[in-house]
Amino acid sequence: AVLLEIPHQEVKPGASFPVTVKFDIAPLWEIRSLEAQPENVATQLKLELPDGFETQGDWQTPPTGRSQSADSHPVYSGQVEFQQMILVTKEAQPGEYEISSHVQYQACDEFRCLSPTKVTLKLIIRVD
């Protein structure tokens, strides 16, 4: 399962807040790191922000583990969270805004990999 979360549903212009993408990966399964090659098997997180919102820095990523497969490539397993800080610019107008994240990942176990999964997660945030 994968979720998109923010700590508060309301923010003020000039404020920053974290957007978190949470994965709950089934036991004995894993997903590739953000830097995995080829890129089509890497975990990918792409935010779509409305006008008046901008990212601050890069995604904060959890530590990787080692795959159960023979090459021991870096993977994520269990419950993992990726976090990106967002700034609401001082010019942002009051109202409701949609933030979305396009997420792609490929789940594998020791014996096989599933087809890559692509999901779009959305949430609403209010600027006061």
Image: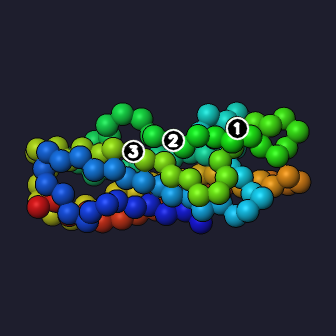
The numbered dot on residue 84 is 3
Neighbor class of circle 1 (other Cα within 10 Å; few <14, some 14-19, many 20+) is some
For disc 2, the marked residue is: 61
- Disc 2 from disc 3: Cα separation: 9 Å
- Indicate the secondary structure of the residue bearing disc 1: strand
Q: Is residue 47 left or right of residue 104?
A: left
In this orientation, which residue lies closer to the viewer: 94 or 28?
28
Q: Position of residue 68 (x, y in %)?
A: 82, 46
- Indicate the secondary structure of the residue bearing disc 2: loop
Q: What amino acid is at disc 1?
A: Pro
Q: Quadrant of residue 93?
A: bottom left
N-term mark: 1 or 3? 1
Neighbor class of circle 3 (other Cα within 10 Å; few <14, some 14-19, many 20+) is some
- Disc 1 from disc 2: Cα separation: 13 Å
* 2 vs 3, front mark: 2
For disc 1, the marked residue is: 74
In the rendered image, the vertical position of residue 48 relative to residue 27, given as above or below: above
- Disc 1 from disc 3: Cα separation: 21 Å
Quadrant in which the N terminus is drawn: bottom right
In this orientation, which residue lies closer to the viewer: 111 or 119?
111
